[in-house]
Amino acid sequence: MAQLLLGKEVTASLNEEIRRKVAQLNEQGVTPKLGIVRIGEREDDISYERGATKRCETLGVAFEKFLLPADASEEEVLKVIQAVNEDDSIHGVLLFRPLPRHLNEDKIVNALAVEKDVDGITDGSLAGVFTNTALGYPPCTAQACLEILKYYDIPLSGKRAVVVGRSLVVGKPAAMMLDRENATVTICNSRTQDLPQICQEADVVVVAMGKRGFIGADCLREGQTVVDVGIHVGDDGKLCGDVRFAEAEPVVEAITPVPGGVGTVTTSVLVGHVVEAAEKTLL
Ligand code: NAP
């Protein structure tokens, strides 16, 4: 039986640290605040927003919503971005993507001040991840994977890590962050040949491919740690990941369940970034 890497345990530890920092900020007269910019009414965005605002409330972080209609013009959106950039009471901004197709996403995303980019979406934040400098913030899901591995003391230095997926939101930044921990990292994509063999060579496998139940026992071996980032709704209506959990769990050493793994940690990482951004304004 594999050890379950439970998101709630990691979240509890992160939340404790966040609460401590919020109390210190409060003593200095600062309440950290998240600005939420949502364009349109996408179900996924609303659901993530609900989770984020709930976590903010629990942890003493304020939030303010900036809601625009799905047909908002580029000018209107840029005006809101400028407003949140200039509002000193807002320390971090969550801008939901993808933006409606008529908007220039690259232009709008990069109009966001990098020091408020707590979701790690600007080119500046990604540069920070690649250069390992304190520029912006890493994408929250990628960082959540690392927080889980760190919390459970999974050895990374000198180990082989495989990341399945190379998106800028998860795969690529997760790979860079594993590299920072001195793992030897292989990044796989949809053209990768011999995926099962490559995965089996790894000590740590991070799966972020967005394909329900794609990774099974043929890709895994004993002794491995598996982080499953995927979120899907199964035929039975229950949430499941990119990994076939029932097949993987008896084989590997440790694994994140879905649900109950990466998802919950992501939200605390986001709120943690807001608090960090607030702290930086006092420096
Ligand atoms: P994405 O943008 O669709 O990227 C998927 C990546 O997987 C791509 O790089 C793709 O390669 C690669 N891939 C697809 N099929 C493959 C295959 N057969 N072999 C190897 N690589 C393959 O997805 P994403 O945004 O990174 O998200 C990945 C998953 O994580 C999704 O299920 C998403 O719902 C979930 N997610 C969870 C959270 C959370 O908080 N838990 C947050 C964000 C996302 P190419 O580049 O060649 O196309």
Image (cartoon, grey):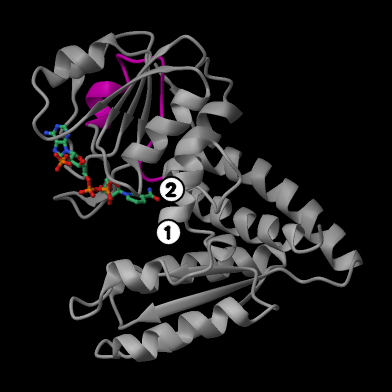
Q: Which residues are magenta?
A: 244-259
Task: State ligand 1's quadrant.
Answer: top left
Q: Quadrant of residue 103?
A: bottom left
Q: At x 63% / y 54%, what residue is drawn? A: 272
> Which disc is residue 122 wearing?
1
Q: At x 67% / y 50%, what residue is drawn? A: 15
Q: Is residue 121 magenta?
A: no
Ligand 1 contact, mark 2 (Cβ < 8 Å): no
Question: Label 2 sits on what residue type?
Answer: Leu
| Residue 179 coordinates in the image, percent (x, y) | 45, 24
| Residue 132 coordinates in the image, percent (x, y) | 54, 36
Q: Quadrant of the C terminus?
A: bottom right
> Which disc is residue 126 wearing?
2
Nearer to the camera, 179 or 106: 106
Question: Label 1 sits on what residue type?
Answer: Thr
279, above or below 71, in the image: above
Q: At x 51% / y 27%, what residue is drawn? A: 149
Q: Is residue 256 magenta?
A: yes
27, above or below 241, in the image: below
136, above or below 205, in the image: below
Magenta: main secondary structure equals loop
